[in-house]
Amino acid sequence: MLNRRRLRARPDDDRWNTRPARARVLAVARTLTSATRVLDVLTLLRELDGIGFSVTVNPGSAFAAGLDDYLRAQPGLTVLPWRDAVRRPFDLAVACAVHASMHRLRAPLVVLPHGAGYNRLVPESTGDTVTSAGLSRRELTHRGRVFPAVIGLSHREQFERLRAACPEALPRAREVGDPCFDRMLASLAARDGYRAALGAVDGRRLVVVNSTWSEHSLLGRHPGLPLRLVEQLPADEYAVAVVLHPNVWARHDPRALLAAAERRGLRLVPPDQGWQATLIAADCVIGDHGSVSFYGAALERRTLLVATGAAELDPRSPGYAFGQTAPALDPDGDLLAQLERAMADQDPAALRPVTDRSLGRRGESARLLRDLLLAHLPGIEQPPGDPRPLPYPRPVPLAAERPTAYDVVATGEGDTIHLRRYPVGPGHHSPRGFHAVADEEPRLALRHTAEVLARTEADAEHPAEAWLAATAAELPGLAVAVAALGPARHLVRLPTGLLLEAHAERPWGAPDPRLDPLLLGSAVAHRLTAPAPPTAGPAGLPDRLTLHTGPHRTTVAFTPRPSRPG
């Protein structure tokens, strides 16, 4: 008789695998922060050695929004509901945020920090107001028994705080360093590619704004700071990127909160798309007491804080000391002046005595952790040699709008022009200089008051010469009109009707140049209002202009229309 007993297929059943697993490892996540960190740790183990990987969400966090979707998008992982994960045996479980409910797991559990050590006071988790989250008896024990097999600490400093909070857990504690920071150190050689992905090119410095979560954070206390930065920093000298704690993304819509700043060129980095690479790319970090700002200081980036988080940090922790020691930024003061002073005067290594207190065993974490994890997988052979942390991939900021209107300050005489441009926002009533506006700018009032108008799209419907003639007829008071012909070549129309083709010259051994048509038009407009240099031609322009934007220099050559035969 045919056996009609139903077989229940399990998501991780070996019969579906091309390579059956000899050991099973479970990653446990509570939030996106802990998920990205635990998946980072799992890169130290290899599927090709016979390890199968599953992941589950430990329920109950207020910041779990979107976590299931994120985990299901990760390759090579079987996603299990919590109710299934606690019923199945695993050879090892790893979590980067501990909760007492994890005692239900049927596996030796390794718990690790999900930030730069253990710093934050979270009474809802710890049950008191004096113990750092992750080190409390309430989190580490069940019915009086310590349930994690290993409690990973990033530095010896944390042993004493664990001893004070939960002394019975001390025999389970191991110093393992910080794998995230060590991977950042291993990624330093990729800095140029990271900077290019964030727009820090042509001499621009990269300012990274970082906010943790809560009302005590940068975004909680000074939500307008990112907008003020992109309004006050010259757009050709600074690029600004924002990194927000995943808990902010779980409870809010950052794109809505920062929409005005994004329209002025701000780059917003998603929490799973490269905050580590963004820190490596940074020249300066403006932040608060969060781990990302702490890591930035540890990477010896100039660091300025606008919030210290003293009310929610363990006063014995390095995170608290960081908030009290790092230089402060006045968010209502002159931001450009403060940044330039920090870049000129701040010693990048000044905060190392503080950051060293949380980031122990530098460069050793991958080896320490791999050995610790493999010790719980006796059927898996240790790969030869020490593990080499993979460089972080390039950051992928959300698509930012390029500003379409600038307030331009231009100085200089002869054939050298110095330019500073600032994005123009709504309610802009006191220009520093004159307006240079892109053809796609939707605010008609700006179009009609601009001294420079530029079409930035080279592959346009109407030929450049025709568009310039139509623009001159529409706006007879315009000083200069420019139509893009390519990345570094443009057609310029002067008030006399004279057409000049302009191109940026490439110095020997230099990359192909870029030339913003609005920047070119601004330089030409200023040159036409200044006394003509001796080398000027009939149009009042020399054959070449050198444009300075901060430390970056571009030389532009002009060619008039060739005379037509006959």
Image: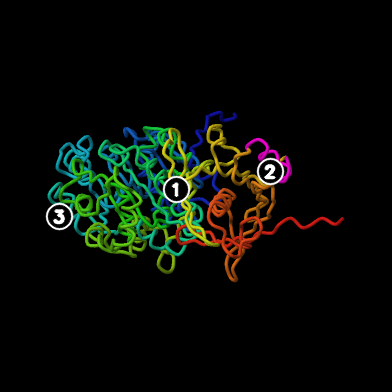
Residue 355 within the segment the image draws in magenta: no
| Residue 476 image-quadrant placement | top right
At mark 3, the secondary structure is: helix
- Say which label, 2 or 3, has the lower sequence index: 3
Residue 174 locus on image (x, y percent): 24, 57
> Residue at (64%, 49%) from the top-left corner?
494
> Residue at (22%, 43%) from the top-left corner?
309
Q: Residues within 10 Å of mark 3 (few under 14, many from 20)?
A: few
Q: Residues within 10 Å of mark 1 (few under 14, many from 20)?
A: many
Real-space CA distance between mark 2 and mark 1, rounded to the nearest whole angstrom: 61 Å
Residue 281 locus on image (x, y percent): 43, 57
Q: Can residue 108 be seen in this snapshot?
A: no
Image height of 149 relative to 413, above or below: above
Q: Nearer the viewer, residue 392 or 203?
A: 203
Residue 471 within the segment the image draws in magenta: yes
Q: State the residue lying farthest toward the bottom.
A: 508
Quadrant including the C terminus = bottom right
In the rendered image, which residue does mark 2 sit on?
468
Q: Residues within 10 Å of mark 2 (few under 14, many from 20)?
A: many
In the rendered image, which residue does mark 3 sit on?
160
At mark 2, the secondary structure is: helix
Q: Which residues are magenta?
A: 462-475
Q: Nearer the viewer, mark 3 or mark 1?
A: 3
Q: Does the CB distance between marks 2 and 3 fall below 8 Å? A: no
Q: Amino acid at mark 2?
A: Leu
Q: Nearer the viewer, residue 425 or 544?
A: 544
Q: What number is the disc on residue 53?
A: 1
Q: Nearer the viewer, residue 120 or 325?
A: 325
Real-space CA distance between mark 3 and mark 1, rounded to the nearest whole angstrom: 34 Å
